[in-house]
Amino acid sequence: MKYALAALIISVSSVGSANAVLPLCGGDGSHQADGKQAPSVFNAAQKVGTKASCPISGEEFSIAAATLHSEYKGKYVYFCCPGCKSRFDKDPEKYLSRNS
């Protein structure tokens, strides 16, 4: 138990030093938006600090340097976690149709 706790402390402290952004959703993409929130779709790459919403979870967040994104048909979409990006990349039209 001591070793697991030490590993966790080291892991958390190294994440903080890398300025990584941990998603509030848990990071596995196992959540689904309720369909009320249209995803943020941009015509160009966005600057750090721009507000966006994840097309999968609907979570609103500020884009950070480490925020994952996909380019699809000339549009930029940003994600709250790697799991959401993976789900989007498998069927982008499913999630972008909420924007219409």
Image: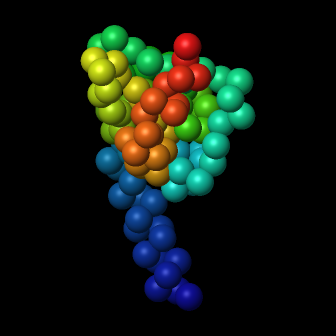
Where residue 87 sits: x, y (%)?
Answer: 46, 46
Of residues 46 and 88, the one nearer the viewer is 88
Where residue 3 sits: x, y (%)?
Answer: 47, 85
Q: From the viewer's perspective, is 61 left or right of 91?
A: right
What residue is at 59 percent from the left and 54 percent from the top? 30
- Location of residue 70 by image quarter: top left
Q: Quadrant of the N terminus?
A: bottom right
Q: From the viewer's perspective, is 62 left or right of 65?
A: right
Q: From the viewer's perspective, is 96 left or right of 44?
A: right
- Location of residue 79 by image quarter: top left
Total marks in image: 0
Q: Note whether residue 71 is visible.
A: yes
What residue is at 48 percent from the left and 70 percent from the top? 8
Of residues 69 and 5, the one nearer the viewer is 69
The image's colour scheme reads: rainbow
Q: Quadrant of the C terminus?
A: top right
What residue is at 32 percent from the left and 47 percent from the top? 18
Where residue 68 sits: x, y (%)?
Answer: 36, 38
What residue is at 43 percent from the left and 34 percent from the top? 92
Where residue 49 sits: x, y (%)?
Answer: 43, 20
Q: Is residue 25 above or below residue 50?
A: below
Q: Note whether residue 54 is visible.
A: no
